[in-house]
Amino acid sequence: MMSSKTQTLEVTSPSSQSVIFYLLCAGFVVNGIVISLIGPLLPMFEAKWGLSDSRAGLFLFVQFSGSFVGVLASSALISSRGFKPAITLGITLLGLGFALLNAPTFVLALAASGIYGLGYGFATPGTNLWVGESYGARRASALSIMNLAWGAGAIASSPLAMLAMRTSHITLLLYVVGAFAAALAMVLLAMPFGKPPHEEKSASESANQKLAGTGLAALLGILFFVYVGTEVGTSSWAPAHAQRGMAWSTNTWALAPMFFFAGLLGGRGAAAAILLHLKEVTVAVAGLLLAATGETIFLAGHSLVTLFGGAFLAGLGLASIFPILIAWLSKWYGTRARKVGGVMFALAALGSAFVPPLVGVVSRYSGSLRIGLLVPLAGCAVMLAVIAVLRPGTRV
């Protein structure tokens, strides 16, 4: 019996596709380093320019506002020119903005964060969509490897920042990563990306998609917005909170995001096996409860164990949420997930742009970053409430 879906053959040869995939993995390692390094650098920038938490939060606002613009622009660019221009432009902007981050003035540094944020918005959706469409039935495995590469870069950002600050080589680190990104973009520009497989919608899939309406999209959009805002809000402010949470003889506090991302990375590996035996909604609710516990321990922590342990638990609890949201998007919208997914990526970028700076604003007006970190804790509560309204277990 023939499948109800038809596929056109992809133009890219299997060998070229594999080379492109591994190059994109390298790009995602760079992506993870670039987008995560700002957290460990915030305390340094606050001291350098005498910034308050709310003004330091502008780095996160500008960075992820740039990513929002990049997501919107990449959608149009991919539709008209394919994946290669969006991905190579994104990686180039990531490297350029990152190389300029340690600028002599606050305004120029903000502009640099906007440049690499724009690059993040171009590169991230384009890479995910190319992998998802190019690997067919193996897309879940390929995307897992790709996101592990991003996690590796995010984890590496903390020790790299700590070492660079100790040796006063911040600018050198930024230049090296920026140059590697530029070289990677040049190599990718010469690769034959080809066209990914295109699947036609079956009649049964069309009938199922009628169940997915505007209300469902709105609730799913809230989850994307709040989840990414909660993740970035926690990881970005973790170093500053750890620094103030106890007395340190060195700058080991800069490792706090590493423990968060270690929990995130390890949890995603474990979630792949757990989801084979438990319902997605069960894993999501349990994960959010664990994340809320970790957030509480972290924001109340005054020791190395509670600060780093709380950050790890928060990452571990949040680990399964984003993959589950992507799974629900694909399940409920089928081939329409490409268009609806563009909106969800944009909302995720907005969450990144608004929630982390909100932590800084609350910190400034309350006089305590500890109180500001109640914002991502509240994000866990909001997601639990939305899932209760959404009732994913009752949907096809």
Image (cartoon, grey):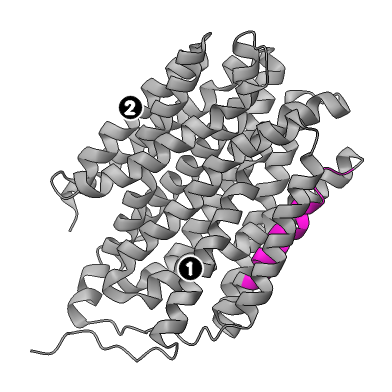
- Residue 16 sits above or below residue 214 on the image: below
Q: Is residue 284 left or right of residue 362?
A: left
Q: Is residue 9 magenta?
A: no
Q: CA distance from mark 2 to mark 1?
A: 33 Å
- Residue 270 sits above or below residue 78 on the image: above
Residues packed near mark 2 inside 10 Å, few (<14), some (14 to 19) or many (20 plus): some
Report which quarter residue 141 is drawn in. bottom left
Question: Which residue is drawn at the image coordinates 77% and 59% (left, top)?
Answer: 96
Question: Among all residues in the image, which is located at the extreme left?
Answer: 1
Return the disc, 2 or 1, that comes first in the chain's sequence: 1
Give the main secondary structure, helix, strand or loop, of the magenta stretch.
Answer: helix
Question: Among all residues in the image, which is located at the extreme right?
Answer: 104
Q: Which residue is mark 1?
A: 22
Counting labels gives 2
- Residue 186 sits above or below residue 158 on the image: below
Tell me where residue 236 appears, x and y as whole percent. Answer: 60, 34
**Label 1 is placed on what type of residue?**
Tyr
Question: Which residue is drawn at the image coordinates 50% and 62% (left, top)?
Answer: 25
Tag 1's secondary structure?
helix
Q: Which residue is mark 2?
A: 290
Question: Which residue is drawn at the image coordinates 48% and 68% (left, top)?
Answer: 22
Say whether marks 2 and 1 touch (CB < 8 Å). Answer: no
- Residue 267 sits above or below residue 306 on the image: below
Q: In front: mark 2 or mark 1?
A: 1
Q: Nearer the viewer, residue 200 or 98?
A: 98
Tag 2's secondary structure?
helix
Instruction: Provide the residue span drawn in magenta.
Output: 88-103
Could you tell me if residue 373 is visible in this image?
Answer: yes
Report which quarter residue 47 is drawn in. top right
